[in-house]
Image (cartoon, rainbow, N blue to C red):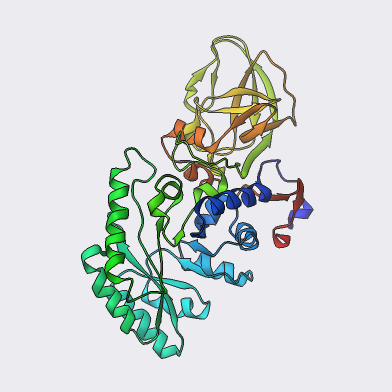
């Protein structure tokens, strides 16, 4: 059955491409003359990989960053021409696919570099590599002391072009910034010893938080991800630029009822009405990525007012206490975004659940359709 054959539930994540363009423009201007690699891993942080990739290519991004090979291949098959760096670790069996789809490869060790060069030589192609230096994240990459050996090997590799050298910051979204600044200083120390060997390699270390908070981290290129989508890197972090939230998560009231004082609501009856109350049910739950952590702490917007989510969030539904107010079946409900003069941000939900804003948006599952708008009008993903 095709989507056009049915009337789906009115739960949708609306993605404002004009807001994405605004955010890119603001960030691009803020870091100039550094280039911008737009990071759109994890389905563009839940916003739609292909549509956001196309929009950012149109906006003038210098490159795109993703986590895995599959994401890069999907972008290539969609017709994107920009350089695309797969930031994560690679497996030897994937190297041919990187070459076939012209994807930039992270060389995170001498062993990986050797395998990349060997496969490129066998296939008669040249591999575009970014060398990964671990300055304190302790995830992938060679330690700073081993960086010269990796660079020297890369220069000698017959079928590798070193187009980048990079690292990643562990604490740029926290206070104090001492550890992050130490990582930046260590990376710059590495660069001072090897850049003469790889003069065309673009250095990059700054994520969203660093590019906005640590000027010396901007270098040749920056890698914003969460900030592109209008969210702060961590809850409550003040930013020096005005960004617009790209995602609006909304649904509609599907049921209304009045419950007496003392009545329990949802699984476990973890909330009971102190007085006679009006409840509305919303057809969205943790199966859609609106997690149980929001039970009894989050709010939604109905008719421009905030109302609390009460009882445990279910897999497919949640309940809202509207007190003595009125609401009707079909009324719009906003879970992330603005309505009237009120607004709920991903940062607010992140703070309530002890996480970061980008986990909130990334968690919105594929069960929730993405609707793309430009100039206030809906467009098909293929038209972006």
Residue visible at 46% across and 31% down in the picture: 352
Percent position of residue 212, x then y: 46, 46
Residue 56 versus residue 98 in the image, above or below: above
Residue 35 horizontal side relative to residue 88, left or right: right
Residue 213 versus residue 354 in the image, above or below: below
User: Is residue 366 visible from the viewing direction of this image?
Assistant: no
Q: Which quadrant does the N terminus fall into?
A: bottom right
Q: Nearer the viewer, residue 345 or 360?
A: 345
Percent position of residue 310, x then y: 54, 24
Residue 111 horizontal side relative to residue 206, left or right: left
Residue visible at 28% across and 78% down in the picture: 152
Percent position of residue 235, x then y: 45, 36
Q: Nearer the viewer, residue 1 or 65?
A: 65
Q: Quadrant of residue 62?
A: bottom right
Q: Nearer the viewer, residue 299 or 291?
A: 299
Q: Nearer the viewer, residue 120 or 165?
A: 165
Residue visible at 61% across and 62% down in the picture: 60
Residue 366 versus residue 97 in the image, above or below: above
Percent position of residue 349, x then y: 50, 34
């Amino acid at each position: 059955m095709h989507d056009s054959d049915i009337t789906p539930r009115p739960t949708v994540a609306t993605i404002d491409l004009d807001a994405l363009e605004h955010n890119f423009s603001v960030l691009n201007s803020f870091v100039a003359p550094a280039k911008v690699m737009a990071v759109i891993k994890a389905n563009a942080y839940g916003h739609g990989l292909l549509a956001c990739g196309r929009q950012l290519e149109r906006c003038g991004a210098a490159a795109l960053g993703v986590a895995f090979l599959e994401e890069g291949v999907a972008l290539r098959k969609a017709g994107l021409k920009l350089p695309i760096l797969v930031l994560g670790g690679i497996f030897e069996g994937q190297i041919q696919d990187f070459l076939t789809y012209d994807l930039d490869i992270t060389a995170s060790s001498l062993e990986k570099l050797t395998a990349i060069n060997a496969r490129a030589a066998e296939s008669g192609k040249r591999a575009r590599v970014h060398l990964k230096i671990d300055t304190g994240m302790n995830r992938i990459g060679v330690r700073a002391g081993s960086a010269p050996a990796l660079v020297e090997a890369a220069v000698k590799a017959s079928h590798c072009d070193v187009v980048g050298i990079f690292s990643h910051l562990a604490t740029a979204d926290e206070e104090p910034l001492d550890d992050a600044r130490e990582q930046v200083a260590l990376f710059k120390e590495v660069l001072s010893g090897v850049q003469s060997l790889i003069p065309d390699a673009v250095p990059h270390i700054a994520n969203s938080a660093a590019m906005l908070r640590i000027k010396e981290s901007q270098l040749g290129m920056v890698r914003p991800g969460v900030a592109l989508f209008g969210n702060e890197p961590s809850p409550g972090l003040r930013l020096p630029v005005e960004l617009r939230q790209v995602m609006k998560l909304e649904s509609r009231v599907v049921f209304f009822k009045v419950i007496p004082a003392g009545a329990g609501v949802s699984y476990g009856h973890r909330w009971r009405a102190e007085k006679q109350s009006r409840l509305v049910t919303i057809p969205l739950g943790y199966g859609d990525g609106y997690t149980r952590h929001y039970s009894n702490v989050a709010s939604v917007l109905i008719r421009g007012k905030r109302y609390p989510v009460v009882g445990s969030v279910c897999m497919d539904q949640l309940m809202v206490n509207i007190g003595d107010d009125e609401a009707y079946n079909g009324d719009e409900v906003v879970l992330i975004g603005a309505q009237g003069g009120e607004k709920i941000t991903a940062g607010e939900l992140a703070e309530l659940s002890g996480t970061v804003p980008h986990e909130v948006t990334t968690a919105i599952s594929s069960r929730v359709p993405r609707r793309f708008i430009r100039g206030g009008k809906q467009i098909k993903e293929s038209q972006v």
